Image (tube, grey):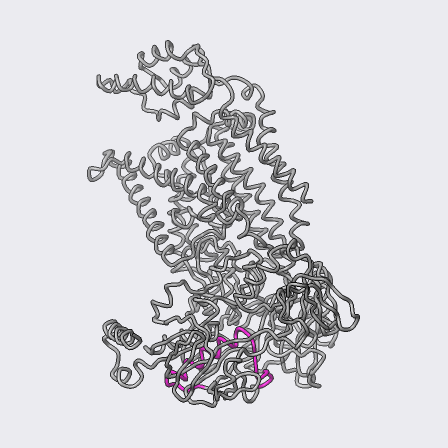
Amino acid sequence: MNSIYFCSKLCNTIKLLPLVTTKCATTNFMEHIVIIGNGISGVSAARHIRKLSDKRITLVSAESDHFFSRTALMYVYMGHMKFEHTKPYEDWFWKKNRIELKNGFVVDIATATSMLHFADGETMRYDKLIIATGSKPNKFGWPGQNLNGVQGLYTKQDLENLETYAPNNKVCKHAVIVGGGLIGVELAEMLHSRHIPVTFLVRESSFWNGVLPTGESEMINKEIISNGIDLRLSSNLKEIVSDDHGKVKSIIIEETGEEISCDLVGLTAGVSPNIDFLINSNIKTNRGVLVNRNLETNIPNIYAIGDCAEQSKAIGNRRPIEAVWYTGRMMGETVAQTICDNKLEYKPGHWFNSAKFFDIEYQTYGWVFAQRGRPDYEKHFHWMHSKNKICITIAYHKDTHLFLGINTFGIRMRHEFFDKVLTDKQPVEYVLEHLSDANFDPEFYKLYEKEIVMQFNSENTTNIQIKKKSWKRIFQTN
Amino acid sequence: MKTIQNIGLALFLVGLAIFTALIFLGKYQVTPENLDELVNNKGIKSELFINSMTTNIVGKTFSNPFSFSSEVRTVLESANEMHKNNSEWDKVIWDKPHSFSYQIAKQSGSGLIKENKGLFWWLTFGIGILGALMYIIPNVVIKGPPGIKNNGIWFNTATNRGWIGWFAFIFLVGFYLLLYFRPDYIVNWTYVVDPISKNLSGNLASQWFLYGFLYCTVMTVMAVRMYIKYRHNKYQILRTTSVLFFQIIFAFLIPEILVRFEKPWYDFKNAFPLDYDFFFSWNLDQLIASGGLGLFILVWGVVLTLVIVPVMVYFFGKRWYCSWVCGCGGLAETLGDPYRQLSDKSLIAWKFERWIVHGVLVFAIIMTGFTLYTYFSGTDAVLGIKTQSIQDMYGFLIGSIFAGVIGTGFYPIFGNRVWCRFGCPLAAYLGIVQRFKSRFRITTNGGQCISCGNCSTYCEQGIDVRAYAQKGENIVRSSCVGCGICSAVCPRGVLKLENGPEKGRINPTEILLGNDVDLMDLVNQK
């Protein structure tokens, strides 16, 4: 069956592509690339392999038939979008680009025979395998963590569960979120949109202060509270209590012993690589699948990318595992080159990220460290608007004034501008002089560059003058 | 707050119900004086018609507009038929039957509404406006602090093609059908705005005055909604103010005041070919006969289309017209805003769009070519096709059905820019300029896109914005009207509408900013 399909596929392809070079036809024409996971990493890899070659590509997923944007699940629950809208490509896209889709759950990889084993007993042979299985929500062994109504927010199934356990504030009279990160605040916003009262347990003394400097972290605390969320800082979960039917009834806080009754518990204390199915294989893992800079695992022809990959040696200031949309995409772009005979190291450029905390947009370029773990040489300049929820923090070297990074809240900034500044190793003064070029807010928005630079000048007794916005510089046209 | 909203909704529905019910109220009675006036005004030479009117209609009381209209049309048509059979061409009355019947009905109506115009204005417009505002304004509190609050849009049957949406669709389509094709049924509506019309132009209200007034009212009320919804976004505030200004001043007040001074009715911002009858002989004749102002309008109309429009599109994109000035755009951006997510984003829809909208542009140009040829040569047919019939066909298919019935009636089903996207010949023209010679683009912010799809979902023109943004590519599309909502709903600050140098405006990328510099160079430089 499989071989017949294989054959007809081959013939079809040859008919369609009469000009394929002999090299392709003889050596790797029908090499079968299997990608486990159809998230942004796997799909980026598949798309780029297709652009570069005519290899047979199969995308395997047990989560959904088609690629969707995980980051948009919150908008489906909030009624901004339908699930259909989260799919970046129309359903015909995959067939047209000859990317085969396989709905199945891989339980084992037999590396010796290059064979995948599925939960339903089926098998699939691969020539090259890319593991892109993403993450799963962390569970730290809390009593009751597997009860009904206890869940993370990561998969399509999580969204469906949320519709079951928290469709409205009658079924779900109260919800508790455990873990103060980006997913936690998203889940709080989601539940808030359906008028479900939320208690938000955060281990740290201020929201996300392991990442954000103090002032910014405090501004987000305020934003969360002003949206009616019961934010509990320095609070840990002790246990989740069950009702008679195996569903969550309440939670108990470690520090105070307080019991809060609830119908939903959101576990959002970070994620870890989703690689349980590799336990019996001989692919080397630590917390994630260990890879070298070429994204290769210890087994030839098996690669790992995205959230589930762990760099054997961290790259620069980056963590060995980065569960971020952009890095997943970048690894996909890179591994495609390697697989198509252009062996490349994964060399992510300057760090950047973004998020939204209720109504406050956040962007970051380069490195701005929080209180904890900040290098001695890193100096911060912090500007905050007197009334509106707008602030920026610029990190720079206290001696050389080298610009290190920027956090912006409520102001949009240009990625290209900061990428170039970081590459060119410009000093902080350069950034301040050119803040008008960096601004990416919609037209007619009030600009704060003058205020910002004035404050910097008065704090540092400098005399930096803002340069007028220049299209020439922005678009680097000469 | 919720209570105020509910009372508001109830009041609005009462106003709407009374407005609808007006059609069925009142009486129609033609007096001999009415008939004389009509005969004199229209220069009617058909004794058959006059006699038949006198025996069958004059003095009789009709209790609804439908039977009245039916009687008048019967008289008109039977007289016309007789004259045509006898080749008495000068006696034939060439008016459209329903328009003709409207003119008689307007004079001969009587009863409650005609006697209490002010009262009924308050019972319809007044209550409707008050109710709508009571529904809209509490959202300042209910929807929470300023920011994008699209919560529940896809759960609401009014905005997700649910039953309220379909009901609104039927209502709007019905309204446009009456307005364009059965004006004699809605005479009562025009009475309600007679006093306002009298004050402005000195004339009684026609159905077009009613439409203009209603248009401005709806836009104003729904602009309040826009001001609240996007109070954090200055681009949206200014844009809404701009379309409102151009609608009320340019499309409504100035033309009516021109009429008061016995000048031709003209909307100075309405550019050909959207203003498709600008070159029709009756319009040219009227302009030429109106002295200095008429000639100015003639020159202005030509310069507007040939110079001002494309030059402005070069500098600012077609948004300067479609989202800042145009009346159709103005209605779409106010009344239509709740429906923007319903536009079809599929590739196939884009294909249809390009064929249809450019087809209409070609149609408009050919029709105008025929018109001008006929005007200057004096022959009434080109290549065996009558200019009059091609004009009538355009007016019916595009001017009425497409722009009105489909263009606005289909808001709750296909989104708020159906006309602008699929039908408007001016939009097609501006789009060609925007695509090939303009400084406007929507810049994508490096590699920041997370493919969430809010931008595509809320694009009223059905552009799959995400398809570009997730590739780090700027959005340069002929159909983009620059409403700025994609940029507003983006949770990651990825999109910015801006006018910059043409060089590098279209920037296809394969590998996005943030990745290996060598890889970006390798793949992107082709």
Q: Is residue A44 visible?
A: yes
Judging depth in this view, the residue of A9 and A421 nearest the camera is A9
Judging depth in this view, the residue of B500 and A393 nearest the camera is A393
Q: Is residue A318 magenta?
A: yes
| Residue B10 vertical position relative to residue A73 in the rendered view, above or below | above
Q: Position of residue B413 (x, y in %)?
A: 45, 46
In which quadrant of the rendered image does the N terminus of chain B lie?
top right
Q: Position of residue B116 (x, y in %)?
A: 58, 21
Q: How many tags in the picture?
A: 0
Q: Is residue A184 magenta?
A: no
| Residue B346 vertical position relative to residue B78 in the rendered view, above or below | below
Judging depth in this view, the residue of B401 and B312 nearest the camera is B401
Query: Seen in the image, is A72 located left or right of residue B83?
Result: right
The segment highlighted magenta reads A316-344
| Residue B76 vertical position relative to residue B139 in the rendered view, above or below | above
Q: Residue furthest right?
A: A256
Q: Quadrant of residue A22?
A: bottom left
Q: Is residue B312 visible?
A: no
In which quadrant of the rendered image does the C terminus of chain B lie?
bottom left
Query: Seen in the image, is B76 located left or right of residue A452?
Result: left
Q: Position of residue A195 (x, y in %)?
A: 66, 55
Going 45% across and 68% down the picture, which residue do you hit? A67
Judging depth in this view, the residue of B61 and B223 nearest the camera is B61
Q: Quadrant of residue B375?
A: top left
Query: Seen in the image, is A5 located left or right of residue B18?
Result: left
Q: Residue furthest left?
A: B384
Going 44% across and 38% down the picture, which residue do you hit? B173
| Residue A197 vertical position relative to residue B202 in the rendered view, above or below | below
Q: Position of residue A21 (x, y in %)?
A: 26, 81
